[in-house]
Image (spheres, rainbow, N blue to C red):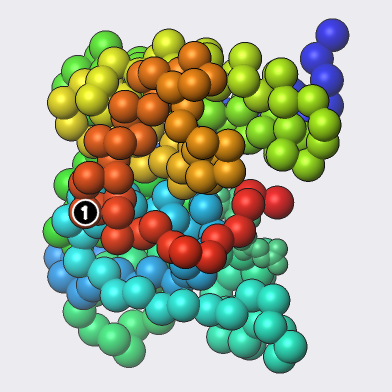
């Protein structure tokens, strides 16, 4: 029998491609003029979900400006942020589809890290990080992201609780999905962007993953850390994903 979290995560995984295609349509059809203004990336550098999107913006060479918002300060979140994203979460990416700054309708707000990854090619200058012309690599991206979404609640339980066994088992599953040097081979895809913030935190907390029978993940983390698109997003203070 399916557990409730499994149902929810399956539902979410079904929802993400649907929302992505709706967003892509909105982005491509909302204006006749070309997209040239830099996107606005609203973030908090301590958040792993926001880090995912930040890496993708960097790795895809997108044209964007970064604005940090304080999430848990005494004054609460600013009104403009609530108006932009009523869920009150980062990251948020705002993509203009016209050069006319007075045209409010020509703005698309993408308020979720997975949606941002999927739509990165819609950002000015952005190159897709989804290998559309390589079915094998596309399948490898899909499997890695699926396994990662299963890892997140297991990792949370392990970090907060006593037993780490289920987390190490799930990490071995992820390890087996890494082709190397990046998840799908020689180039960065959304799978690398999605995985790095979370797996970096695990390595930071528990040490080199090679010692946990995850040599591929250990080498992959090393490769990512040497890539400026990843290394510039690493912070000395950071949050877990809960
Ligand atoms: N599903 C969202 C989750 C983002 C998320 O949980 N962000 C946290 C910070 S790491 C947040 O904004 N929390 C603000 C709050 O809960 O009030 C995504 O992937 O973008």
**Residue at the image point whose x is 82% and y is 36% from the top:** 161
Of the 4 image quadrants, the one containing the N terminus is top right
Q: Is residue 87 left or right of residue 30?
A: right
Q: Is residue 164 left or right of residue 91?
A: right
Compared with 76, 145 (above or below) is above
Q: Provide residue 107's location: percent of width, then percent of height.
A: 38, 71
Corner quadrant of residue 36: bottom left
Find out if the beta carbon at label 1 lies less than 8 Å from the nearest ligand 1 atom: no
Q: Provide residue 2's location: percent of width, then percent of height.
A: 80, 14
**Residue at the image point whose x is 61% and y is 58% from the top:** 239
Residue 72 in sight from this viewpoint: yes
Q: How many residues crowd around disc 1 within 10 Å: few (fewer than 14), some, or many (20 or more)?
A: few
Compared with 225, 98 (above or below) is below
**Residue at the image point whose x is 22% and y is 45% from the top:** 226
Residue 122 in sight from this viewpoint: no
Q: Is residue 93 left or right of residue 166?
A: left
137 or 106: which is nearer to us? 137
Q: Provide residue 172's location: percent of width, then percent of height.
A: 52, 15
113 or 58: which is nearer to us? 58
- SS label for mark 1: helix
Compared with 225, 146 (above or below) is above
Q: Is residue 154 left or right of residue 34?
A: right
Quadrant field for ligand 1: bottom right
Which residue position holds label 1? 228
33 or 195: which is nearer to us? 195
**Residue at the image point whose x is 15% and y is 65% from the top:** 34
Q: Provide residue 29's location: percent of width, then percent of height.
A: 29, 56
How many numbered circles does the render carry?
1
């Amino acid at each position: 029998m399916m557990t409730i979290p499994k149902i929810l995560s399956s539902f979410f995984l079904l929802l993400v491609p649907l929302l992505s295609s709706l967003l892509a349509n909105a982005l491509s059809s909302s204006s006749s003029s070309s997209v040239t203004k830099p996107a606005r990336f609203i973030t908090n550098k301590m958040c792993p979900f926001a880090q995912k999107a930040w890496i993708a913006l960097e790795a895809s060479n997108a044209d964007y400006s970064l604005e940090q918002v304080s999430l848990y300060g005494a004054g609460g979140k600013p009104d403009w942020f609530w108006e932009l994203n009523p869920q009150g979460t980062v990251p948020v990416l705002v993509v203009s589809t016209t050069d006319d700054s007075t045209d409010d309708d020509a703005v698309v707000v993408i308020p979720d890290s997975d949606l941002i990854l999927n739509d990165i090619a819609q950002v000015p200058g952005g190159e897709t990080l989804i290998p559309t012309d390589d079915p094998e690599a596309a399948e490898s991206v899909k499997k890695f992201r699926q396994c990662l979404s299963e890892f997140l609640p297991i990792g949370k339980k392990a970090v907060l609780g006593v037993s780490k066994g289920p987390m190490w088992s799930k990490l071995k599953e992820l390890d087996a999905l890494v082709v190397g040097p990046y998840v799908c081979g020689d180039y960065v895809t959304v799978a690398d962007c999605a995985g790095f913030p979370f797996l970096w935190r695990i390595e930071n907390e528990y040490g080199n993953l090679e010692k946990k029978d995850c040599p591929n993940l250990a080498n992959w983390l090393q490769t990512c850390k040497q890539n400026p698109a990843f290394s510039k997003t690493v912070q000395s203070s950071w949050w877990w994903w809960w």
